Amino acid sequence: AWNWAFHAVPYPILSYADVMEKHQWLYENNVRLLFQNCGGGRDGNFQQVCSYMYNLAIWNPYMSEDLYYEHMMDACLAFYGDGGKYVYDAINLLEEKYDRQLCYT
């Protein structure tokens, strides 16, 4: 559940553990298709990368953590060009901050 004390902060929620745990549960319960409603606005939540990673996770819910982050870097570069490496770093910094602050459980 999301801790609404941090609702003003962008929340990509793209950590390997979070995404893969949810998608493994879906896969184990015979879900094979998802409608990804990640939007496309300019609110700082990296919806394009989020949607891409969620779709990869439902396709391969048991990919390794290294492969997951490799795909995330590829997606950041594809969507944001040369700035993708900075977007990737920003996503990881946000995730680390959330983990330390226990923003979601």
Image: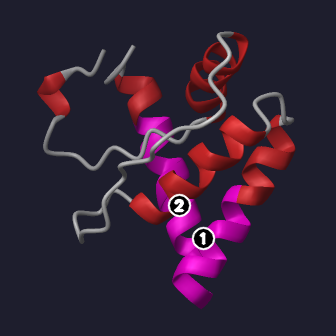
Residue appearing at x 50%, y 54% in the figure: 51
Q: Main secondary structure of the magenta part?
A: helix
- Horizontal side of 58 relative to 92 (left or right) equals right
Q: Residue furthest bottom?
A: 82
| Residue located beneath label 2 in the image | 49
Q: Is residue 77 visible?
A: yes
Circle 1 residues within 10 Å: few <14, some 14–19, many ≥20: many
Which badge, 2 or 1, is on the more N-terminal residue?
A: 2
Bounds of the magenta segment: 72-97
Residue 31 among magenta residues = no
- Horizontal side of 15 relative to 1 (left or right) equals right
Q: Is residue 85 visible?
A: no
Nearest the eye: 104 or 54: 54
Classify the position of the C terminus by image quarter: top left
| Residue located beneath label 1 in the image | 76
Q: In which image quadrant can residue 78 be found? A: bottom right
Give the image location of residue 87, x and y in percent: 50, 69
Residue appearing at x 30%, y 15% in the figure: 1
Nearest the eye: 102 or 80: 80
- Tell me whether the residue at label 2 lies in contact with that at label 1, contact meaning CB atoms closer than 8 angstroms: yes
Residue appearing at x 79%, y 57% in the figure: 70
Above or below: residue 79 compared with residue 27: below
- What is the image's colouring? secondary structure
Amino acid type, callout 1? Cys
Give the image location of residue 25, x and y in percent: 63, 13
Above or below: residue 80 compared with residue 2: below
Amino acid type, callout 2? Val
Badge 2 element: helix
Nearest the eye: 103 or 29: 29
